Every structure is written in structure tokens, then in C-alpha cells.
Amino acid sequence: MKRYIHLLPIVFFALLLASCKSSKNIIKTDGLSPYLSSKVELTVPHGETTLTVNGTMKMKEGELVQMSLLMPLFRTEVARIEATPTYLLIVDRMNRRFVKATPRELRDYLPADSYKRLEKMIKDAAKPGGKATLTGQELGIKQLAKAKIELYDFSDEEISIEPTELSSRYRMVTMEEILQLLMSL
């Protein structure tokens, strides 16, 4: 199980890089509230087994998108992904490591205006008629063709959302290290 948890931030990062959008629709987005939150379910097949991890997503339009993945049963955060217009942060809570990169550092991995694009896809997913599930194959990730992500139970109520602060116990790793781990799945 620990091996699977170690790979969760990598898998989730890959899905985010492909700008996932999925939902079960429950709200009408009228553009009045800058806040949006939902539950997240990530399912990743590994060999003959399947790993499903739940979590939450919080967004304050124009400022911050946070996704938190929680350990089954204990509901402890195992990974966090935070995107802003100025950086992308991926935190592996189990192994106390993180990647933080600017849009310039990500230009080989993400399209221009990826934050705005991610925000738009999340808002579109919350609208009635949005797609409920998106697979890795649909995202163009051959290694994760059968993986899927789902956002559901949306709310546009005001929420508390603060940027992530990490202690000195966390070790910074490179984007290449995360991508190498992804490719070894």
C-alpha cells in the first residue's frame, strides 16, 4: 500500500498536466461567486488491482486551486496539488517531498495560460451537462489509459482557502524526478 501512496502525487500531477475536467453537476455557475469546491475521486489501475483515492478540490477564481488527496479509512492527506497563476506546487505528504515550479519552468510540460485553462475546465465541469468522468486515455496518457478522475458534489459557497506552507522537513525534488517516476509506472 505504501508504494501506491508514494505514486499518488505523480499520477494526480499527470492528470492535472493534461488539464482534467470532470464532474457530477449540482450547481448553476452564474459568475457571482469566485469560490468553487467539490469532492474528488481518483481511480488508478496498477497491475491486476485498482486503487481509488478520494479527496477535495477548492478554488478561488483568479488566485488558487487546491486539490487534496486523502488516505482511505484514516482520511489523512497524502498529497496536495496547488496551482496559482505564478506557480504549481505538488506535495507528497507521505514522503515529505515537493515540487514547486513557475509557468516558465513548466513551459515544456504545460501549455501557455495553463492556470486559466484549468480554472475554466473546473468551472465548466461544475455546470449542468458537464462530463462526469475523464480517463487517462482521453487525456492522451498512454501509461495511464485506464485511470480516471471524477469531480462531484460541487458548491459555490464561500470557503476558506490559504496557500500551502511547508516546513523544513520537506525536501524539494525536480520536475524531472517526478516525471521519471511517472514513466516507471
Image (tube, rainbow, N blue to C red):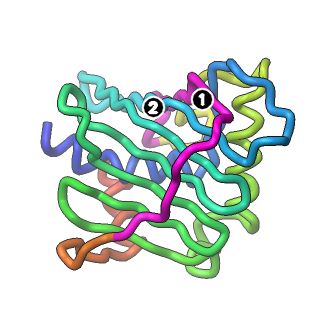
Please give the name of the residue rendered at 67% of the width and 44% of the height, measured from the top-left corner.
35
Q: Residues within 10 Å of mark 1 (few under 14, many from 20)?
A: some
Name the disc covering residue 106, or none. Answer: none
SS class, disc 2: loop
Please, is residue 151 above or below residue 123 in the view? above
Residue 104: quadrant of the picture? bottom right
176 vs 91, nearest the viewer: 91
Which residue is situated farthest in the left direction here?
2
Query: How far, Cα to Cα, is label 1 from label 2?
Result: 8 Å
Question: Picture coordinates of residue 134 (x, y %)?
Answer: 59, 29
Q: Residues within 10 Å of mark 2 (few under 14, many from 20)?
A: many
Give the mark nearest the N terminus, 1 or 2: 1
Question: Picture coordinates of residue 161 (x, y %)?
Answer: 52, 53
Magenta region:
143-165
SS class, disc 1: strand
Q: Disc 1, disc 2: CB below 8 Å?
A: no
Please, is residue 24 above or below residue 112 in the view? above
Residue 178: quadrant of the picture? bottom left
Whether 145 is among the magenta residues is yes
The type of residue carrying mark 1 is Leu
Name the disc covering residue 134, or none. Answer: 1
Question: Picture coordinates of residue 20 (x, y %)?
Answer: 61, 41
Name the disc covering residue 147, or none. Answer: 2
36 vs 117, nearest the viewer: 36
Question: Picture coordinates of residue 13 (x, y %)?
Answer: 46, 53
Please give the name of the residue rendered at 14% of the width and 36% of the height, measured from the top-left corner.
1
Please give the name of the residue rendered at 73% of the width and 23% of the height, measured from the top-left corner.
27
Please give the name of the residue rendered at 71% of the width and 50% of the height, measured from the top-left corner.
119
